[in-house]
Image: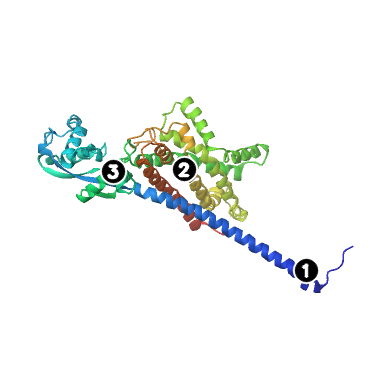
Amino acid sequence: MTTERLPTDWKSDAMRKRIARRYASERRFKIAGLLAVALSAAFLAFLLFSMMGNGLRGFTRTEIAVKVDFPASPLLLDPNAITDQALANANLPMVTGEVVKKALGANAEEWVSPTAWTVLRDAIKADPKILAQTVTIKLPAATAIDLAAKSDGSPEAEAAVARLKKAGLLTTGVNWGFLTASDGTDPTQVGIWGAFKGSLLTMLVTLALSFPVGVATAVYLEEYARKNWLTDIIEVSINNLAAVPSIIFGLLGLSIFLNFLALPRSAALVGGMTLALMTMPVIVIAGRNAIKSVPPSIRDAALGIGASPVQVVFHHVLPLALPGILTGTIIGMARALGETAPLLMIGMRAFIATPPGGITDPATVLPVQIFLWSDEVSKGFVEKTSAAIIVLLVFLLAMNGLAIYLRNKFERRW
């Protein structure tokens, strides 16, 4: 038997304590939520600051100014007959070492990069007249000198840096070559352009395959397909494919595109086709949700004024659903851009020293390039890895920012 609660019970001590406990519980929940957000922000800030600390140094390079007396050097070249073959026969690595020792002293050849001779070669090709002159050329410093100039080197390297700074021969500036060069064995000379171009070509193939097929599938399932057991199986399969680990798609691409169809290994074509398989379910799901969000009154009004079912879909429903479809597509492409496992399975981990010229040329992508550099022994690749991660994050942020912009610009509220 229950007793009826009187209005005066709401002012009793028991009720006031109950209300106080409820408010205290809400405050604790609010504080816990704020602490969770603060902890997440702290981890994100730590990640960004540590990455920036190493990565920003990857965009710089230390150079040593060396006076080159070409007439007195062992370089025997005719200024009027400078060809690639003549430069190849000139033994520029040995000449560069002799020039550096003459200008800076014994053992100084260890202070410059092993690939410093390419700078000498490019200077001669740009102006053959310097072969009759004495000029000062800035050669890239070796990894040890570069790290010491950035306060992260051995005592011997720091002593050499101090000597070079005292002589005014050492400079550290922006390394534009990092944005225009490709992979290499020397961390002072590597760049991300080859991997960046490979990523662009791979994403173009992925978009060209996944977008039209994904949108057409979404339109068919939402507007034309009958609701029966077959369409239910298709819907469940698409939802399951969206949750399949990415490495499974890599195995599928390996078995079909490489082993069965014998397509070129480590090419942007195969990488794009593999990532298209992974991205397509995401586009289908996003497209169906966008089409569902269009009110039925739009369809009824179009049919009421004499439009055919095809005109209703392509003239009214699809244009109104396009912002949501584009947003889902860009997010799916951003996910594909950061994938590494499926591309490793199809062999896109090759050493690519020349940027790909097309979708069938050997290529690599930014995530794989980051993976390869992180596995290098040389300490100089640490900052290059962080710098490449910064480039990848900027690329991803740009794609997500574009998705937000398109959603806000074309979104309609019904």
Inspect the image, locate mark 1, and give the three-letter code of the amino acid beneath it.
Ala
Q: Is residue 136 above or below residue 7?
A: above
Q: CA distance from mark 1 to mark 3?
A: 76 Å
Nearest the viewer among 106 and 123 is 106
Inspect the image, locate mark 3, and give the three-letter code of the amino acid beneath it.
Ala
Q: Position of residue 131 (x, y in %)?
A: 12, 39
User: Within the image, what quadrant is residue 103 found in?
Assistant: top left
Q: Residue at x 50, y 57 (%)?
A: 408
Tell me whether circle 1 and circle 3 mark residues in contact (CB < 8 Å). Answer: no
Query: Can residue 414 be seen in the rendering of this structure?
Result: no
Label 1 neighbourhood size at 10 Å, few (<14), some (14-19), many (20+)?
few
Residue marked by disc 1? 14
Q: Is residue 91 above or below residue 64?
A: above
Q: Is residue 318 above or below residue 364?
A: below
Q: Is residue 317 left or right of residue 75?
A: right
| Total number of numbered discs in the rendering | 3
Q: What secondary structure is found at the residue carrying circle 2?
A: loop
Residue marked by disc 2? 338
Q: CA distance from mark 1 to mark 2?
A: 57 Å
The quadrant of the rendering that contains the C terminus is bottom right
Label 3 neighbourhood size at 10 Å, few (<14), some (14-19), many (20+)?
many
Q: Is residue 151 left or right of residue 99?
A: right
